[in-house]
Amino acid sequence: MSLQCGIVGLPNVGKSTLFNCLSTAKAQAANFPFCTIDPNVGVITVPDDRLDTLVELVKPKSIVPAVVEIVDIAGLVKGASQGEGLGNKFLSNIRETDAIIHVLRCFDDPNVVHVDGAVNPVRDKETIDIELQLKDLETVENRLLKEEKRAKVGGDATAKRLVEALNLYRDALRRGEAARAVKLTEPQREATTDLMLLTNKPVLYVCNVDEASASTGNAHVEAVREAVKREEAGVLVIAAAIEAEIAGLETAEEKQLFLQELGLEEAGVNKLIRLAYAMLNLRTYFTAGPKEVRAWTFRDGIKAPRAAGIIHTDFEKGFIRAEVIKYEDYVELGSEAKCKEAGKMSVEGKEYVVRDGDVMHFRFNV
C-alpha cells in the first residue's frame, strides 16, 4: 500500500530540513527560495513498540516495519494558483499526495531570510490556504459547468448528487473555507471520489521552532493553535534544526541522552510519523514467524479478504479463512503455539473486520 504525505510550506520554513530528518532520502537544504524544485520522495518507517516486542518473542531472520512515503514539495508563493513561482508544479505535486504536512516557521532568526520579510506563521498559513482554495474553486466551477448539463439533459442521479456536492464545495470555498469543512451525505461523497480537491486532504500543522521553544512552544505556536482551532487538524511543535542533530547521532543511547538534555521524552519526528500514519486513517496488522516478522498497513475498517490481498492478490482471490491472535494475548502467552493451546487463536471468515494489532495467518486456495 503506497501512501504519501506531502510536506508543504512557504520557502525557507524548514521543509527540507524536516524531510532530511524523516527520510532515508536526503534533500538539499539552503537559505534561499525554491531550493527544492522537483519533489524529493523518501520512505520512512513507522515507530511501533509492538513490532519490537514481537521480534523479541519470535526472533525472526528478518524484520519489515510499516512505512509511509514522505514527499518534500517545492515552496509556494502568492499567486501559485495562477502559475506564479513554481505554482502549477507545486499544486500538481500536492494533488498526488494523500495528506498534507504543513510546515510553519515559528522561530526568529535574522540569518534566515523570510520570503515575506517578517515571521508570521498565521499569515503564512493563510497564504497557502488561499492559493489551495483558489485552485480548488477553479476545479469545482469548471466541473460544475459540465455536470449541470449532464444532470439536466440525462436526469442522471449520480450527476445530480455530484452537482449538489459541487455547489456545497463552491459556497464554502468562496467563503474562504477548506473543502474538508463541508459535510456531505454518503451518496454525495461517493459521487465526488475523483475530484481530488487540495483542501479536502487531511492536514497536520508542524510548527518549526528554535531550540529554546522545543519543549514549551512560543507565542508563534499559540497564534497557530488559535488560528486552526476550528479545523479538523493537528498541531505539532518540532525544532527541525535540533531534530537534524539528533538524526545525525549514531547510537540510540546518544540520541536519548541528547533528548534528555533538551527536556524531551522522544524525538519530534517520531511523533510526526505516528500522527501522519493516523491522519491517513491507517492501522497495522502483523504476520509473525521464524522467517519474518512484518507490519502490514491497512485502512481502518477493511475485512479479512482485503487485508489478505495486501500481502498478495492471490490471498484475496482464494481466501478461505484468517487465523487471528490478539496482540495482547500473543505477548501475554509468549508464542503462537501457546495461544493455540489456550484457545486464544480465533478462526475468522470473510466478514471479519481486521483490528489494529491483530497477528494473522491467512489460508487460501487459488
Image (cartoon, rainbow, N blue to C red):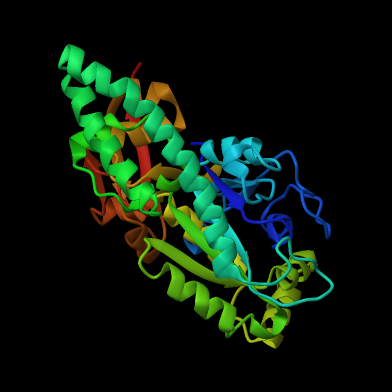
Comparing 182 with 118, the one in front is: 118
Comparing 79 with 314, the one in front is: 79
Q: Specify whether 64 is left or right of 27.
A: left
Residue 365 x %, y %: 33, 20
Comparing 358 with 132, the one in front is: 132
Which residue is pictured at 73% across the width and 67% down the height?
117
| Count of numbered circles on the image | 0
**50 lies above or below 110:** above
The quarter of the picture where residue 318 lies is: top left
Q: Specify whether 111 is left or right of 101.
A: right
Residue 67 x %, y %: 56, 47
Which residue is pictured at 81% across the width and 51% down the height?
28
**127 lies above or below 2:** below
Residue 351 x %, y %: 19, 36
Which residue is pictured at 45% across the width and 27% down the height?
312
* Placement of the C terminus among the 4 image quadrants: top left
The quarter of the picture where residue 241 lies is: bottom right
The quarter of the picture where residue 17 lies is: bottom right
**283 lies above or below 253:** above
Residue 35 x %, y %: 79, 49
Which residue is pictured at 43% across the width and 33% down the height?
139
Q: Can you see residue 57?
A: no
Comparing 222 with 174, the one in front is: 174
Q: Can you see residue 85?
A: yes
Q: Specify whether 64 is left or right of 153.
A: right
